[in-house]
Amino acid sequence: MTLTQFLIEERRRFPHASGEFNSLILDVAVTCKAIARQVACGCLAQRSAMPSCTQGGKYTLVFEPLDGADNLDLNVPVGSIFSVLRGGMEQVAAGYAMYGPATLFVLTVGNGVNGFTLDGNLGEFMLTHPGMQVPPDTCECAIDAGNSRFWEGPVKRYVDECLAGRAGARGKDFSLRWIASLVAETHRILLRGGVFLSPRDCQTGHLLQEARPIGFLVEQAGGRASTGRQPLLAVPPAQQQRVGLVFGSRHEVERIERYHGDPRPVELHNPLFNDHGLFRMPA
């Protein structure tokens, strides 16, 4: 099934739809195909600026054309993130394109999450990952350990427990990884689970306009998205601000939220540099 056929089938659920919404999504897909061609050229590409937000009719499109652009010179997967709002407030669709060994277009229109792979011979996005679901449990965590000095107690507590592994409070070993590409991290979590943490207190956070569509996607796939302190989708989309971004396997995100709501002070050592931590110190 092509993306066009998929959207036609989805439209049958709304017999009075005008077709404007489908046209908008297909326009985004065409734009992503053009970006994929440019990205495939690497440093040979002629890069040009693109609009980040367009509004016309009853829909607003927020489009981040190249998230993780710093990774281009390293040939690491990068992507585009988009969000469709009705009336500027109601989230009705979200998705991303990932440019790597294959070009993928992952989309939710509020009825689950589906992934499409670009067929280079046909020039069409074909449905290859129907009904994507985030497993509720995981043993993978993605966080930038270089910002650990800025983390608040709840985040340190969670990461310490992950690093303690099977001998610690969690009773299982975790893998810590960091791609530094939001789209690539999201895609990995959609395929096999995991939790992503980008705490607001690490002096960066994420712009709400790129965090919110990721949150919508993850929750449509059965996962959970949060700022750490509140559900991400509870933050009004009109607010242009940086927020903490925690998303992925539901049970892990809920645990992190509980830690943020726990008023007890947490006394922590720093296992990142202990004998059995992430980095082993020389004797």
Image (cartoon, rainbow, N blue to C red):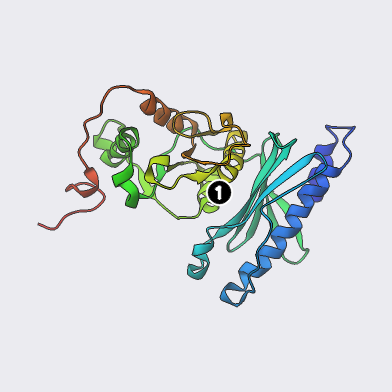
Q: Quadrant of the C terminus?
A: bottom left
Instruction: Name the residue: 40% across, 46% down.
Output: 203
**Residue 36: x percent and y percent?**
66, 64
Is 55 rendered above or below residue 117?
above
**Residue 191: x percent and y percent?**
55, 45
Q: Identify the amino acid type marked 1.
A: His
Q: Quadrant of residue 165?
A: top left
Secondary structure at badge 1 equals: helix
Q: In which quarter of the image is residue 157?
A: top left
Instruction: Name the residue: 19% across, 53% down.
Output: 280
Is 124 rendered above or below residue 205?
below
Which residue matches tag 1? 187
Instruction: Name the residue: 27% across, 30% down.
Output: 169
| Residue 254 in the figure: left or right of residue 154 | right
Which residue in the rendered view is the most extreme toward the top? 263
Is 78 rendered above or below residue 155?
below
Instruction: Name the residue: 28% across, 38% down.
Output: 160
Q: Is residue 265 visible?
A: yes
Circle 1 residues within 10 Å: few <14, some 14–19, many ≥20: some
| Residue 229 in the figure: left or right of residue 147 | right
* Count of numbered tags: 1
Q: Is residue 130 visible?
A: no
| Residue 22 in the figure: left or right of residue 216 | right
Is 21 rendered above or below residue 283?
above
Which residue in the rendered view is the most extreme toward the bottom? 44
The foreground one among 213 and 217 is 213
**Residue 109: x percent and y percent?**
72, 38
Q: In which quarter of the image is residue 19?
A: top right
**Residue 106: x percent and y percent?**
65, 48
